[in-house]
Amino acid sequence: MGIFSFYRSVLLGCRWRVFALPAMFLIAFGSSACQKAPAPSDAEMVSETVVLETETAGGRGPASVETPPEDVPRTAAPDSGGGGFAPMPEPIIVVEAYESVAERPEPSTTTASEVAVTPLEDIVATRVFAGPSEYPPAEFKAYGILAFPARATSQTLERHSFICEAYLARLPHADEVSASRSVQMVTVWPMRTDGQAANLNALSPADTCARAVTGYGLVAAHDAIKDARKAGHRLEGRGPYLLAWSPASDKGRADVLVLSADLSNVSTAEGARNVMHKWAQDIEKQPDLWSNGWDLEKVRLAIQLWVDRFGENVLLAIKEGT
Amino acid sequence: MDFVKIARELSCPAIAGALVGLALVWWVEPATKGGTTLLIAGPVMIFTLVERVVRLCFGRNSNVEADDS
């Protein structure tokens, strides 16, 4: 069978499969792209407070407790000895809903169960340069660090610089934002000395990166990488890594929640900006929603960084070979 | 026409791979020319390789065919 006749038979025999496969990819990726709905706005993130009260065996609930309608079948009491009903808990009746905790009156002693959800705080992603004595910064809600495994050399200076520029571009300084530090999730750029850190915190971003890269605080970075490894993260690449702990006091423990991002495959300024953007989005979620698991956007970003890093090398190798 | 000749020479898996590669480029949005090239060339190579393997495993052997005749 000649190769041409083989292809002809493939074309005639399974034409629909040949075109169905890319079509399925297009549909899958298209639908995932369409599902990139905007995050709910601050106004939409309204928490609710609901008080649930039930009658208890030992007493009656407050006067506002509504009795269920007569036609609703009640379960038999366990000690009634008849009826054939399995003993079931009393039904929960929602009697009042309050918009805030302050509005809600003191709970009665006869309240059996109460669920009160406090309003969600908006976490703001910020940045700060910190010296050895200022690390970890205590007054923030949570903190992260941009941890390079090694200082910049003449070969890696450009890469360190554009990562620094992306860091400055995406994250506002902790003093710039109006939010109090207790709701800020700060990402630290460690510096070798406290004086260098103080100078950089006062400088405009245009002058900052050259000094930040040369005065990088490697010891704090190594400690952070070590602590993240203790928590089970594999950090074996060339880095840098974005690592965050919540709460900050749990840093160094083995069973803590650590959010991490690996920038080992970042080879372009645009890639660095994309990673910083994703990082800021991730840490602005509530820490209990942090996830290091599978996420389609993370996969897309990982593929982008990988092909950008190795694609250029492949093209260079082809050019050199020809 | 050259374009027709090229299209004739291209195999089904290569065309399918190129389409998948284009879909990946659209989704991933690579920042470099190398990244774009890799995203298109990768699926083309993988699809072609899979086709070759499938042909080797399940395709008819031309030598046997010649002997039979």
Image (cartoon, helix red, strand yellow):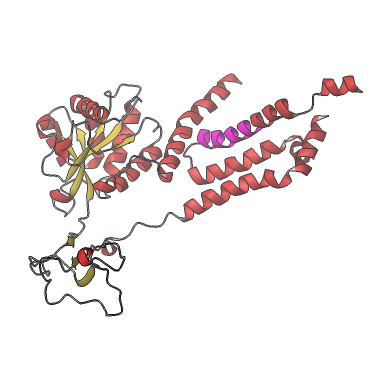
- Give the left or right position of residue A291, taking residue A10 as reference: left
Q: What stretch is highlighted in magenta?
A: B30-48
- Residue A72: quadrant of the picture: bottom left
Pick the residue in front: A142 or A178. Answer: A142
A208 is higher (above) or lower (below) than B52: below
A70 is higher (above) or lower (below) than A100: below
Give the residue displayed 48% in from the left and 29% down from the top. Answer: A310
- Residue A214: quadrant of the picture: top left
A16 is higher (above) or lower (below) than A89: above
Give the residue displayed 83% in from the left and 20% down from the top. Answer: B63
Q: In which quarter of the image is the N terminus of chain A?
A: top right
The image position of residue A71, as x and y in percent, is 31, 79
The image position of residue A87, as x and y in percent, is 26, 62
Report the number of numbered marks: 0
Main secondary structure along the magenta-highlighted residues: helix
The image position of residue A212, as x and y in percent, is 22, 32
- Residue B6: quadrant of the picture: top right
